[in-house]
Amino acid sequence: MNIHWKRVLIGAFLAEVGIFVPFIPALLLLGQEIAMYVAVVAAFAMTFLFGIWVGKGIESRFMLHGVLLGIAAVLIYVAISFAQPEPLLYIIANCLKIVGGAAGCRYAEIRKLKANLTKEVSEVSFPQ
């Protein structure tokens, strides 16, 4: 029933790094306006993917872990941007980090429940 802070913080850090992977080339090749939209999509996608990763290593409180992942990612971004005022799209991106983290952990929870159910069903012996 504990919160797995190590997984949450590593996932948040890796999600933030992952956001920069498509953002930097988009910024250099397509310009700032397009890169802002890339950042919004990447914010959700990366926290979703790392939410799945966090969810694989836990047994309970999946949504809480996902929300904490998103909040940690937002705090990391605020720290590296020196808490400067941001355009509305970046504020939306930060909100999507929380939604993405929660959705990713929820997805991991559903997959884990289905795997456990399949295992239980396969272990049931049917009379012949």
Image (cartoon, rainbow, N blue to C red):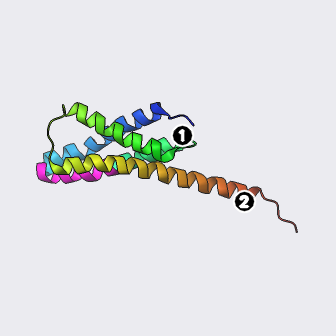
Three-letter code, disc 2: Val
Q: Position of residue 86 (x, y in %)?
A: 15, 43
* Residue 126 spot, x, y in % from top left: 83, 64
Q: CA distance from mark 1 to mark 2?
A: 23 Å
Depicted 55 relative to depicted 3: above or below: below
Q: Residue furthest right?
A: 128
Question: Predominant secondary structure in magenta?
Answer: helix
Q: Residue at x 56, y 43 (%)?
A: 60
- Mark 1 — residue? 57
What is the span of residues highlighted in magenta in the rendered image? 32-44
Q: Which mark is residue 99?
A: none
Q: Position of residue 39 (x, y in %)?
A: 23, 48
Mark drawn on residue 121: 2
Query: For the view shown, which residue lies furthest in the bottom direction?
Result: 128
Label 1 sits on what residue type?
A: Gly
Tell me what residue is drawn at x 35 percent, y 40 percent. Answer: 71
Check if residue 35 falls in the magenta segment.
yes
For label 2, the SS is helix
Q: Quadrant of residue 24?
A: top left
